[in-house]
Amino acid sequence: MPEIAYVNGAYLPLAEARVSILDRGFLFADGVYEVAAVIGGRLIDNEAHLSRLEKSLRELRIESPLPIQTIADVEAELVARNELNEGLVYLQITRGAAGDRDFGFPSGATPTFIAFATKKNILASSAAETGVKVLTVPDMRWARRDIKAVALLAQVLAKQAALDADCQEAWMVDDDGYVTEGSSSTAFILTKSDTLVTRQNSTAILPGCTRKAVQSLAAREGLTLEDRSFSVTEAYEAKEAFLTSASNLVLPVVSIDGRPIGSGAPGARSRLLRALYIEWAMNPGAAR
């Protein structure tokens, strides 16, 4: 069965999906995106993702090409047409294609909306069993990181630096030595006093949807939560560390810059929070 994508109102084979070379997403990275997980054929925490999509569009003054509920219907249709049981649905909206390449907002351009589905083994992830290794790198991104923009070159370079160092993720660090977030994830540490710490929401980081859900689950378990900056040194000394994202849920971090975190194996709290998130995701009626 061919993979089916969505492009500006049409469902068509992925190999036939096309947008204009004058699209501003291609020329200027003038657009936003979202990624939602699919487990058991159902989109996970999708209301949070679509709410963040609306905010990103407002911040960039891009008009949504469809009502948000209709976008959710497109996602559901892609899940059905691709017979997707487990994986991801990707959405991207750009300011559209203009008649020429000019920096100012074009008048009369129609936003471009594309989406596609990808199969991925999320639940039985080998990284959840072994943990992941993290490399710290300087944070070179633009100042409005709270907008989920398609301008991802700094994250691409950070991720490749991690891969070159035999790590699976990069944690980006600001000029003061504090971790902001991962190249494609939210960074958490568990202190020796069992306090769960992640950076406070601001323009310096993306407000993670999975982050928010995991924090709610952690609070339900009685963990103390702190939204604050933490240094690389504090991360080295943490009892546990983990990352969260829609595409990976919760993954334990076992080393940072070659230094083992805790015992150097996935921590008990990290494993618990992953299990609790999966339980919640697979039981949509359950409280969070």
Image (tube, helix red, strand yellow):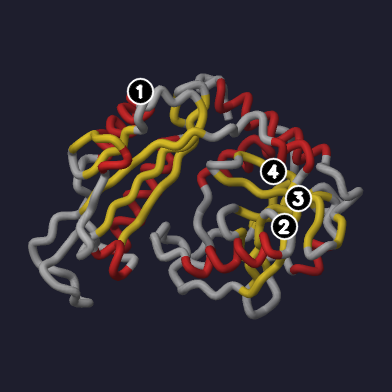
Q: Which badge, 2 or 3, is on the more N-terminal residue?
A: 2
* Numbered label attached to residue 251: 4
Q: Mark 3, mark 1: which one is toward the viewer?
A: 1
- Quadrant in the picture for the N terminus: top left
Q: Quickly name the residue at label 2.
A: 167
Name the one closer to the observer, 275 or 200.
Answer: 275
The crowding category of the residue bearing disc 1, from other C-alpha atoms within 10 Å (few below 14, some 14 to 19, many at least 20), is some
- Residue at screen point 88% across, 51% down: 262
Name the one closer to the observer, 192 or 88.
Answer: 88
Q: Secondary structure at mark 2?
A: loop
Alpha-carbon span between mark 1 and mark 2: 35 Å
- Amino acid type of the residue tagged 1 in the rendering: Ala
- Residue at screen point 14% across, 66% down: 98
Q: Mark 4, mark 2: which one is toward the viewer?
A: 2
Q: Quickly name the residue at label 3.
A: 253
Q: Secondary structure at mark 1?
A: helix
Q: Quickly name the residue at label 1.
A: 80
- Quarter of the view holding residue 49: top left
